[in-house]
Image (cartoon, rainbow, N blue to C red):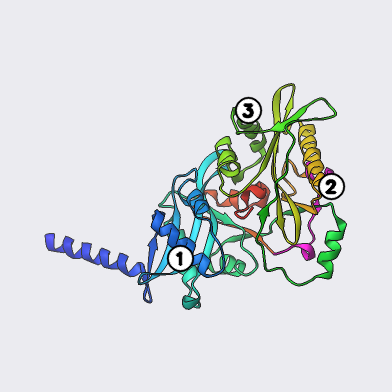
Amino acid sequence: MQGYKGNLTRLLQYEIMMQNQHSGYDIIKGIADDKELENYRVCFQKHGTDRDIENLYWIHRHNLVKANEIYYAMHGQTIAAIYTALPVYFRINGQLIQSMQSIDTITDEDHRGKGLFTILANRLFDEALANGFALIYGFPNENSAPGFFKKLKWNSFGEAPFLIKPINYFYFVKKFLNRNKQKDFSSTNYLFNAPLSYSTNDHSIIKPIQAFESDYEAIWQKASMSMHVCVDRSAAYMNWRFIQKPAEHYYRYGIYIQDELAGVVVFSIKNKHDGLIGYIMELIYDPSKPAAGKALMAFANRMFKKQQVDVVLTWCLPHSFNYTCYRSSGYYVLPEKLRPQKLYLGARVFDEKLQSTVKDIRNWYISYSDSDTA
């Protein structure tokens, strides 16, 4: 009997070893220590993409779930391919559930054409539920979308829900005359002396938010009642996303009605896409006080115009509680021809009990907070 158990143990160990090897490659899960993340950064730098090491720490070591989902295909001591996801808390039907956002994928030029991306992704997906994750979502571009939606069985919800507010119409003339497809998506922060307070027509006060606290949490709980599938935008998340993120600068403002917080707006301005681009990252307000949302949008639009921004972008689905606020503030659906690149919203569910909820796009809430590049 003892010999049988020993043979069975050796057989299982052999099967695990074979699962981790694919035609000379070892498939391993990372641990996100200093040495590993530096090698990760160097691998991307080698292929023309700069990754800030502090940003890698923020994603893989300082996320709110306190976990990392990094997978490598190793060829000896060389990184042949990487696929990673950001652990996040989702709010699904009012419950907090561990989930992931697809982040980085790269294959070394000497190891392409061998299906390593698919192998790595399937390994991550196979282990996801056991590691406590219910789903993965993300925004594949037009090059990677076929791999996600066909090979990896993601559900596609179509293109990312871009809205646009034109400010400088000469910018569009210039973009129309220069029809070459954009390849450079690098950006730098644009900083200006933002006001310390701003009074609205109804005597409310808009002022900067130094940290998201319990008064914001109360608004989020009200706003999220109509959101059945979304990243949980709690105060902890907002602080992590917009205060603690390295090398980024966000303008965070709240509107106070009779000294009580009624809504928040987060925006940024970047030198990008051959112009000065504004981004509404998040607009959350008490749904029973739509005037608060409109006042915040009017304030943000005023800032964009004063800084001579060319165009403002945001993401918002048509059924979202704040969609009419955007539209009444001069935001329009961005025509496909004007989009700098095609991005698609997709997801794959690991917990079968959530399939029907997650597969219905009408249950989702998306904003530019979900972007891993902004």
Q: Which residue is mark 2?
A: 330
- Please give the range of residues in magenta: 325-341
Please tell me which residue is depicted at 84% across the width and 43% down the height of the picture. Answer: 328
Q: Residue furthest top?
A: 258
Label 1 residue SS: helix
**Whole-percent x, y for residue 89 in the image:** 52, 44
Mark before the other along the chain sequence, 3 or 1: 1
Please tell me which residue is depicted at 49% across the width and 43% down the height of the picture. Answer: 64
Quick check: 280 left or right of 170? left
Q: Which residue is mark 1?
A: 120
Please tell me which residue is depicted at 60% across the width and 33% down the height of the picture. Answer: 211
**Whole-percent x, y for residue 106 in the image:** 52, 67
Mark 2 or 1, closer to the camera: 2
Query: Is label 2 in contact with label 1 (beta carbons under 8 Å)?
Result: no
Q: Which residue is mark 3?
A: 215
Identify which amino acid the numbered label 1 is placed on.
Leu
Identify which amino acid the numbered label 2 is placed on.
Gly
Image vertical order of residue 225 relative to residue 356, above or below = above
Q: CA distance from mark 2 to mark 3?
A: 29 Å
Camera-side residue: 134 or 33?
33
Mark before the other along the chain sequence, 2 or 3: 3
Label 2 residue SS: loop
Quarter holding residue 321: top right
**Whole-percent x, y for residue 307 in the image:** 79, 47
